[in-house]
Amino acid sequence: MGHVMLRKGRIMGRGKPAQTKAARGRKSATKAMRGRKIAKTSAKRSSKKSVKTSKGASSAPRRAIENALASLAHDIRTPLTGILALADLLIASDLPERERGWARAIRNAADHLAQTTSVVLDAVKADRAGLAIRAEPFSPRQLADAMAASLSARAAVNGLSPDIAIAGDLPDRAIGDPVRLRAALENLVDNAMKFTARGSVRFAVTAAPAARGRMRLRFAVSDTGAGMTKAEIARLFRPFAQASKAVSLRYGGTGLGLVLVKRLARAMDGDLTIDSRKGQGSTFTLSVTVKTPPARASGAAEGKDGIETPTPSLRILCAEDNPFGRMVLNAILGELGHRVDFVRTGEAAVSAIQRDRYDVVFMDVALPEMDGLEAARRIRALPGDAGRIPIIGLSGRSSNDDVEKARAAGMTDYLTKPLSPSAMVDALRRLA
């Protein structure tokens, strides 16, 4: 054994001090505490890094989906432009009143489908609820008339009797979300048709004053179909549930329609209620609250069917690669009395502006090779009057970002497909 001696209360051996048991315990506890702090700090950093990585990873697929849907919307809206334009031309022609009514119904349905693409894009951009309610001017009377025409046509096909009751005091103007409101009404009408084998379907619309200068609209869709018990009604507003298993097997469907309609109604400060009796039919009442716009100035022009000439004859260059798009532009602008030339690429548009004199350019944004934005930038770089020519952008994309990009590229105006004669007339008027 080595030499051991005592000195000042410490045990010394072989020249190395030996710690007491208490000292060793304190040192061990201190090390453990430091280790826990380091581990906690590391965990926090790791957690923050993980959250950032997770957010970045989750936003990438969302952006990809949004871009894909935006492209799909553009592709859908281009042929819809053709349907809308041809319907407008039919309405303006010498059709009997019954056939003109059919053409109006076609136009209204195509216009609603086009606007629905915007709803899909909004849902992707919004949170998971996807209910970003808009505040746009619209005509409750025109909406009610369009739904009545749609219901009457479908009732005739199904061998049912339509019963329409639209209040005479229904306003011509309001501010709300007509796209989602019509989507909700279409769902209710679709259900009425699906569950009614014989008899009639009724569509009633009324309006009443609401608080703070607003207006309450009530839409009631009634049928003489199978009807429901109270227990079946209670199941209707559960996601992916229907009135009963028998109903699901016989009629199909996801069971999501009425759930979404009720959510839309409540988002618009309203509700969806049901009155039903087994074997006698059902009545679904959708109520929403809309704002009342300021009184229109006297002498303001009212919209009407058909096409009217707003300006003197112009020489117009249209850059459009899609056959449907060229047909529509040629039909509308030709009917308005303008002379139209067509090119299919952005590069050809720039060359045409350098070569000939035009009054205005309609430029599709999604052109092959050189897109419409780059073509607009190059036109703006041209010297003299050619670089100052008005350029109206055309696109199936309708977000504020897309509009800002068009403005930044030098476009004078921006129209969203599907194009309507009235929208093109208004754009040309704004240039006057």
Image (cartoon, rainbow, N blue to C red):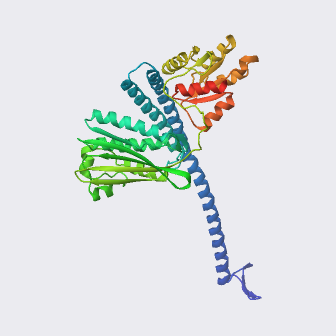
Name the side, left or right, on which 215 lies relative to 191. right
Looking at the picture, how far across and down is residue 116, in whole percent? 47, 38
Name the side, left or right, on which 4 lies relative to 39. right
Quadrant assignment, res 143: top left
Looking at the picture, how far across and down is residue 306, in whole percent? 49, 24
Q: Is residue 115 above or below residue 18?
A: above
Of the pair 339 and 13, the residue shown nearer to us: 339
The C terminus is located in which quarter?
top right
Looking at the picture, how far across and down is residue 150, in whole percent? 37, 35
Quadrant assignment, res 300: top right
Of the pair 372 and 394, the residue shown nearer to us: 394
The N terminus is located in which quarter?
bottom right
> Is any part of residue 173 visible from this angle?
yes
Of the pair 367 and 327, the residue shown nearer to us: 327
> Is any part of residue 61 visible from this angle?
no
Q: Is residue 351 above or below residue 289?
A: above
Looking at the picture, how far across and down is residue 341, in whole percent? 58, 13
Name the side, left or right, on which 16 lies relative to 101. right
Query: Which residue is pictured at 67% across the width and 75% down the height?
Result: 30
